[in-house]
Structures are given as structure tokens and as C-alpha cells.
Amino acid sequence: MTDKTTHSPHLTPLAASLPATVPFIGPEAQERANGTAFKARLGANESVFGPSPKAVQAMADTAADAWMYGDPESHDLRHALSATHGIPAENIVVGAGIDGLLDSIVRLTVTQGDHVVTSAGAYPTFNYHVTGYGGTVHTVPYTADHEDPERLIAKARQVGAKLVYISNPDNPMGTCHDAQTILLMIQNLPEGCLLVLDEAYVELAPDGTAPAFNIHDPKVIRTRTFSKAYGLAGARVGYAVGHVDLISAFNRVRNHFGMSRVSQAGALAALADAEWLTHVRRQVQTSRAALTQIAEDNGLTALPSATNFVAIDCGQDGAFARAMLTGLTARGIFVRMPFVSPQDRCIRISCGSPQDMALVAAALPEALTEASAAAPATSRNL
């Protein structure tokens, strides 16, 4: 069969050479395929606790003004973030979630033949952007279920990397490094290399996880989001903090009207509602404890988490964990799992409501029994 995409005269040679991949298959696609809705949506690390009611009201109040473009400078939100973090607004850029910001970062720094370093099994959308601009991705393994700063730096030196990517706290394992470890990593970056520090989950992490912002250091750019703790994944709002020269360069490539007026209003109100953020943190802590207990009740091990999800070690290999995931999906529980060994021995379950936790507690032992019964046949298929 002819691959019409590959041979299209409209594509660049680079685009034609890339596989048509989707980093994540959405739960909606799975629901369409299965012909039924999930009972518990716990796979995408969204916040089922929702956004601040004040953010919801702000977005509703702004909806009638949706005929206007959003402020292309995101002025009010940037200045609110400036006040929150105690840094100048000129060191902050707002974008369509961390994914949109990663696209701009890679577009600004990577071209055909450039080398980039990340961890094997870390956030795949970063790799997606790198290959989309012609870069070459080099990976290093995790160490004890943590991304390994020393290995990342060593590989960057070896290949002459333009970028090194690390998430802290980490997705998909939920582990984290302390601020001093990250500062040491920044200090040890090779000349000409930029650290992309993804802090999507940092509001949910223990104190001492994030270093203080150093806006004068040109070697690091940090990305944060309103998708996780603030519960605005569907609004697509993120921001990056870095040296003014790099932040101002975003204006060369970013989608200046990429932020909707409604999303900007929601993020601004969410940022101001510290009480709701505290409430969500408590809910996440409660749910992490519940998931840990559910794992223990079934003879499994939950990894310590600094995020709004828990990675549960299923005790065998990736094939067994996939069987577990399939069993949970069949019972209406949407979860995901790491995709690289040995992390793929785990399944990853987002934090949820007490009702969600009850559904997981009921479905997990059934999925475990089913996967265990099929384990010999599964092993023969490896």
C-alpha cells in the first residue's frame, strides 16, 4: 500500500521522514473505541478536584468577551506571576501549557543534526518536538526510579548536547530530587548547553524540591503549568522562567495569539486563590495515601510520590503491568504506565476523589488476579 503521507509533495523532507505518532492516546479515543465511558479518569494526571471556583467564575464572566483575542502579551498574568515569584515580568513567558512552551524552546535552540539528552522513558512529548525540528535524541537510564542528573550531564558532554531535559518531580515515576541536586546539575552543565527543567508538579512536591529562581543564569529555563495543581489542564496555560535574553527570544517564534482570553482569566484567578491550592494539596495527599494503601492491600508496592499520581510496582515485568492496565481499562478505570523497562513494571494512577479510590480498590484485585492467571502465557510471548 502506498504511503501517501511520506510521498506527499507538500511535506518537507524532514516531515516526510517522521513517523505519524501520537505521544498519548487520549481517554476519549479509548472511550470511542470501547463504546463506553470510563468510570474513573485517572490516567492523564489531571486534577479531578477541579479548578478554583473563583477561576471557574472568572472564565464564565469572560466567556461573553470571547469574541476578542486574548492579550498577546498575557500582561496581567505575567505580572501576577512576577509578584508571586518575586521576579521581573520580563523573565516570564506564558504559553499554551508546557507542551507549547517546549515546542518554542526546541524551535529556538535545535536544528537538523543537533544533539539533545533526556532520560529513557521520560516525558515523550519533548522528544516529539526535538525530532520534529531535526534534532537527535540521546537517552540515559533512570537510576533507582529517579532521573539521573550525573548520567544526563555525562551524556551531554559526550555528544555535545544543545539541550538537557529533566522533570523534577518526575513523570512517570513521581520521584524527585532536592534543590541542591538540581543546582549542582546546573553548575555542571557543559559549555553551550541549556537545561530544560520541567516543574509541572512542583506545587505538589515537598518543600526544598525547587531551587530559588536565578533569572541571571542563562544555562537553565524552567517551565511550570496550571494543568496540575491548579486544575486547568483543559485551559492550556503554562509559563517559562529564564534569562531575559532567552525569554525575549520567544517573541521570534511563539504563537502570539495562542492564549485565549478565557484561559488567561482563569489562570489569573486560580493564581490568586491560595486557599484552593492548599485544599487541592490536601486532597492529593489523601489520595496518594489511599493509593499506597490499595497497593499494599494487594501485595504491591507504591513508589513514594511528589506528584498528583502514584506509580505502583506490579512486581513483575512490563508485560504483566500491561495486563494489569488492560484489566483496569476493561473495568472502566483509565490509567497509564511507563513505556520503557524497567519502569514499565509499574502502572501509574492519578490521584482522585474518594469515589475514584473506591473504584480502584474494587477493580485492582480483579485485574491482578486476571493478570496473574495469564502470566505464564504472557511470559511466553515476550
Image (tube, rainbow, N blue to C red):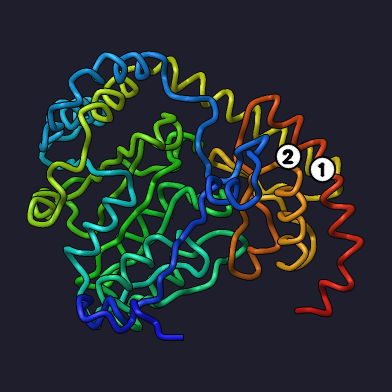
The amino acid marked with disc number 1 is Glu
Q: Position of residue 166 (x, y in %)?
A: 41, 59
Q: Which of the 4 image quarters holds residue 308?
A: top right
Q: Please tell me which residue lies in front, 373 or 224.
A: 373
Q: Secondary structure at mark 1?
A: helix
Q: Please name the residue that numbered disc 2 is placed on.
A: 292
Q: Please name the residue that numbered disc 1 is placed on.
A: 296
Q: Position of residue 381 (x, y in %)?
A: 79, 79
Q: Residue at x 35, y 39 (%)?
A: 225
In the rendered structure, the answer to whether residue 304 lies left or right of residue 211 reads: right
Q: Secondary structure at mark 2?
A: helix
In the image, is residue 46 above or below residue 317?
above
Q: Determine contact: label 1, label 2, CB under 8 Å.
A: yes
Q: Which of the 4 image quarters holds residue 163?
A: bottom left
The amino acid marked with disc number 2 is Thr
- Quarter that holds the C terminus: bottom right
Q: Residue at x 30, y 40 (%)?
A: 238
Q: How crowded is the residue under tag 1: few (<14 C-alpha within 10 Å), some, or many (20+)?
A: few
Q: Position of residue 132 (x, y in %)?
A: 29, 70
Marking on residue 245: none
Q: Residue at x 87, y 55 (%)?
A: 370
In the rendered structure, the answer to whether residue 321 lies left or right of residue 145 reads: right
In the image, is residue 53 above or below residue 103?
above
